[in-house]
Image (tube, rainbow, N blue to C red):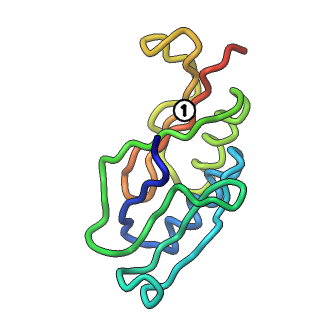
Amino acid sequence: MIDHTGFTVADLRRSTAFYATALRPLGIELLMELTAQQTGAGAHAGFGVAGKPFFWIGDRGSPSTGIHVAFTAENRAQVDAFHRAALEAGGKDNGAPGIRPHYHANYYGAFVLDPDGNNIEAVCHQPT
């Protein structure tokens, strides 16, 4: 079980705004922002649910690229909403919402590239 994960972004303010918009349809929100003085290692933004941040981005070091992160969606409508919100927030389409039968019969996902080129997905494993 993963407690939390994080990676470095090129522009923390821009990426924080992107993720705040893109993850909102999934019920994931910005919960915490930490300064470099607080952490001793760069500023960070933590996103999560019910007061628990589990997805972190920060500005320490070189930005990460090529990372793949998949967020669980409760239903296919949330996947669609995530995709729309991410594109509106400046993400680039990397796979429109749809069934991916090569994974399994009910795998419904959508993919976008974040401002640094990371592949961000929302996926629902439930049938319609």
Q: Residue furthest front?
A: 1
Q: Position of residue 51 (x, y in %)?
A: 69, 61
**Three-letter code for the amino acid on which mark 1 is drawn:** Ala
Is 101 or 48 nearer to us in this picture?
48
Q: Does 54 sit above or below residue 35? A: above
In the drawing, does residue 59 fall left or right of residue 76?
Answer: left
Q: Secondary structure at mark 1?
A: strand
Would residue 101 be found to the left or right of residue 72 on screen? Answer: left
Residue 4: image location, x then y, percent: 48, 54
Residue plotted at (42% across, 85% down): 36
On the image, the x and y values in percent for residue 61 come to: 27, 73
Which quadrant, please, contains the C terminus? Answer: top right
- The residue positioned farthest toward the bottom in the image shown: 37
The residue drawn where x is 50% and y is 65% is 15
Instruction: State the residue at coordinates (64%, 64%).
Output: 30
Residue at the image position 44 percent from the left and 58 percent from the top: 115
Above or below, comparing residue 69 to residue 74 in the picture: below
Question: What is the crowding at mark 1: few (fewer than 14 residues within 10 Å), some, or many (at least 20)?
Answer: many
In the rendered image, residue 3, in percent from the top left (x then y), is placed at: 49, 51
Quadrant of the rendered image containing residue 31: bottom right
Does residue 98 lie above or below 40 as drawn? above
On the rendered structure, is 19 left or right of 51?
Answer: left
> What residue did someone put label 1 on?
110
Total number of numbered labels?
1
